[in-house]
Amino acid sequence: MISILSILIILVVLGVLFVNLSPEFGAMPSKEKVLEYEKLDYYSNGKFENLIQTNMDMDFLKAMKMLPEFFKNDPTRIPSFELPVSNRDSLELVQDSLPTRLVWFGHSAFLLQIDGKNILIDPMFGEVPAPNPLLGKKRFFKNLPIEIEKLPEIDLIIISHDHYDHLDYGSIQKLKGKTKQFYVPLGVGAHFESWGVKPNQIHEMSWWEEAEVEGLSLVFTPSRHFSGRGPTNRFSTLWGSWVIKGNQDNIYFSGDSGYGSHFKEIGDKYGPFDFAMMECGQYNERWKEIHMMPEETAMAGKDIQAKIIMPIHWAAFTLAMHSWTDPVERVTAKAKEIAQPLFVPKIGEFINLRDSLWTKEEWWIKP
């Protein structure tokens, strides 16, 4: 009994030390920042709040009961074959007079090239979306379309929220020396400062805030989700979606979100959109208020007035209990039903907005 108790005490101490000393967890916003947040309608009692009533009652005990189901050995949750990943060469990314185009790295990570600018969106390039590799499952594929070291100079990094599958400490360490500016939600700047990014490079944004950045228009728009990188800092930073408007193209990135009226409001204010990257994966009926079901993804595309949508937040990691192809199968069926144009590119494929975007092959089906 004494041995068991000793082991438990050691584990607790190690856990506390890990949370407090590991840089992956980032940092809390300063007291001065918090005083500014308290002036907002969607900040109360030290926490940011969703604009729509959202059920967040997944407490510790419920989460613990769900763990066996999450870690169940279900072969449908990962690909049974090597995914086709298109490789990109660094020389392809530095040509003059490039059209607006994107490269998808799987999940929610993108390189966007627009009006001569290189923008990384939620650049999670790590192998495991967790503060330690032992705490999560590995990416479906080993090699990225292009490694960080071969990327061109980055003008902007845009972050939707601070969860590990969207904001990765290791990736930022490799990117901070080749990135000019960081646009992040309120509070997320504290993470970047603790990771060695200069304060004058960090720009925090509130919901509906607009910014002009070297000819581009950025708007940080609401989503229905939450934030937090540790056991005690849920809701301490803001979360959201992005509107990116260039000279010709208007683009929307949903971040993570449950379905809600905010999509129509964004569409009415800033649509129509030429291209929209819409969350579609890692969902469950038990948390559908913070992650859309695939059918809702297609409906949200209609709401924001998207000419064409692309399902994201899938094809890289297992973070829910559905099969890995369930998102694309279900959203494709619903999009067809409601006549919402949809495009599913390969990972690494150039997404050229001057081209006619159509799904050339069902690459998620085993060859």
Image (cartoon, helix red, strand yellow):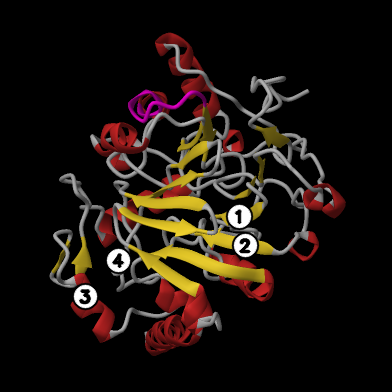
- Residue 355 vs 248, above or below: the answer is above
- Residue 94 vs 38, above or below: the answer is above
Gap in Å between the C-alphas at discs 1 and 3? Answer: 28 Å
Q: Secondary structure at mark 4?
A: loop
Quadrant for the N terminus in the image: bottom left
Gap in Å between the C-alphas at discs 1 and 4? Answer: 28 Å
- Label number found at residue 119: 1
Label 4 Cα neighbours within 10 Å, binned few <14 / some 14-19 / many ≥20: some
Residue sitting at x 55%, y 41%: 247
Whether label 2 touches label 4, CB < 8 Å: no
- Inspect the image, locate mark 2, and give the three-letter code of the amino acid beneath it: Asp
- Inspect the image, locate mark 4, and give the three-letter code of the amino acid beneath it: Arg
Quadrant for the C terminus in the image: top right
Give the mark nearest the N terminus, 1 or 2.
1
* Residue 351 visible in the shown view: yes
Give the mark nearest the N terminus, 2 or 3.
3
Q: Position of residue 43 (x, y in %)?
A: 18, 64
Question: Is residue 307 one of those drawn in magenta?
Answer: yes
Quadrant of residue 163 within the rendered picture: bottom left
Q: Secondary structure at mark 1?
A: strand
Name the residue carrying label 4: 234
Gap in Å between the C-alphas at discs 4 and 3? Answer: 18 Å
Q: Secondary structure at mark 3?
A: helix
- Label number found at residue 36: 3
Give the mark nearest the N terminus, 1 or 4.
1
Give the mark nearest the N terminus, 2 or 4.
2
**Magenta-colored span:** 300-308
| Mark 2 vs mark 3: in front | 2
Whether label 1 touches label 3, CB < 8 Å: no
Q: Secondary structure at mark 2?
A: strand
- Inspect the image, locate mark 1, and give the three-letter code of the amino acid beneath it: Ile
